[in-house]
Image (cartoon, rainbow, N blue to C red):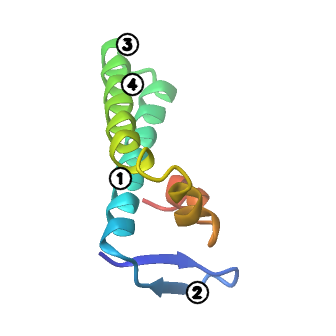
């Protein structure tokens, strides 16, 4: 998996990560994609059943991520996202 971020001048910056960090980032990307889909459901007046299903899926993804990834080393999320300010990019970057 290639992990990259954009610099302030919008140049692509690629860097290597450990397999553990890569798996954490994959989990965060899954959560991001689910949040985007749920926002789309809510803002476009999708049926309530679809919204509830999306919410349950988001809860399931987050609970699985937190159980496996954050409970082992809770500081790890800030280490992954904080140093290079990746969290906003991962949540709101282009799909």
Foreground residue among 22 and 76:
76
Q: Residue furthest top?
A: 48
Which residue is tagged 3?
Answer: 48
Specify which label sits upstream in the sequence, 2 or 4: 2
Instruction: Quote the CA–CA distance across marks 3 and 1.
Output: 26 Å
Instruction: Quote the CA–CA distance across marks 1 and 4.
Output: 17 Å
Q: Nearer the viewer, mark 3 or mark 1?
A: 1
Specify which label sits upstream in the sequence, 3 or 4: 3
Foreground residue among 9 and 81:
81
Query: Residue drawn 52% across and 84% down?
Result: 12
Which residue is tagged 1?
Answer: 27
Marker disc for residue 11: 2
Residue neighbourhood size for the residue with mark 1, other residues' Cα within 10 Å, grouped as few (<14), some (14–19), many (≥20): some
Instruction: Quote the CA–CA distance across marks 3 and 4.
Output: 10 Å
- Res 81 quadrant in image: bottom right
Which residue is tagged 4?
Answer: 55
Specify which label sits upstream in the sequence, 3 or 2: 2
Q: Is residue 14 above or below residue 69?
A: below
Decide if residue 34 is on the left or right side of residue 85.
left
Foreground residue among 95 and 63:
63
For the C terminus, which image quadrant? Answer: bottom left
Q: Nearer the viewer, mark 3 or mark 4?
A: 4
Specify which label sits upstream in the sequence, 2 or 1: 2
């Amino acid at each position: 998996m290639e992990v990259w971020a954009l610099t302030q001048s919008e140049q692509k910056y690629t860097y290597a990560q450990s397999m553990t960090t890569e798996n954490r980032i994959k989990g965060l990307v899954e959560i991001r994609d689910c949040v985007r889909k749920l926002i789309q459901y809510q803002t476009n007046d999708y049926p309530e059943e679809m919204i509830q299903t999306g919410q349950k899926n988001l809860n399931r993804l987050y609970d699985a991520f937190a159980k496996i990834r954050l409970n082992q080393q809770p500081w790890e999320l800030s280490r992954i996202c904080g140093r290079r300010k990746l969290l906003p990019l991962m949540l709101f970057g282009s799909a």
